[in-house]
Image (cartoon, rainbow, N blue to C red):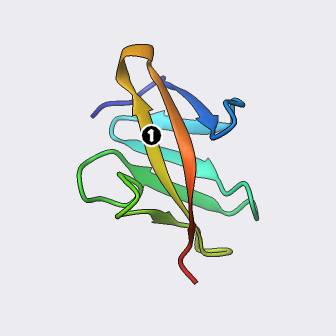
Amino acid sequence: MKITDFLVMDSDGNTIPADPFGNNLAFCCPSCGYPVLAITLANQRGSDEMHPAICRGCYAAYFLDIRPSAEKLYVQAAGSAA
């Protein structure tokens, strides 16, 4: 799913700095600030809770909750991979 120019928010609905482009989302880990890449394609990193994007700085896990009709997406915490 293409998410270019979608509004990106955290789980509380606060806008976060991120770069949604094509099927990819780049954002900084809210825990440690390390860059994280998530992909909206099925079974890819960050596409759902079973396939989280893992921060390589602190090993926090995230997945995308996409709302296509509103052109919004939420970065949800999925626990830790450590």
Identify whether 80 is placed above or below 72: below
Q: Which of the 4 quarters of the picture holds residue 65?
A: top left
Q: Nearer the viewer, residue 20 or 74?
A: 74
Q: Percent position (x, y) of residue 77?
A: 59, 56
Looking at the figure, which quarter contains the N terminus? top left
**Total label count?**
1
Q: Is residue 36 left or right of residue 64?
A: right
Q: Which residue is mark 1?
A: 65
Secondary element at tag 1: strand
Residue under the image location 43 percent in, 62 percent down: 52
Identify whether 60 is placed above or below 3: below
Q: In the image as oriented, which residue stretches furthest toward the left? A: 42
Q: In the image as oriented, which residue stretches furthest toward the right? A: 32
Amino acid at pointer 1: Asp
Identify whether 80 is placed above or below 14: below
Q: Percent position (x, y) of residue 66?
A: 41, 34
Q: Percent position (x, y) of residue 4?
A: 41, 27
Residue under the image location 63 percent in, 41 percent down: 11
Q: Which of the 4 quarters of the picture holds residue 18?
A: top right
Question: Are there few (<14), some (14-19), or many (20+) residues within 10 Å of tag 1?
Answer: many
Residue under the image location 58 percent in, 84 percent down: 82
Q: Is residue 35 left or right of residue 39?
A: right
Q: Is residue 54 left or right of residue 18?
A: left
Q: Percent position (x, y) of residue 56?
A: 58, 74
Residue under the image location 34 percent in, 35 percent down: 22
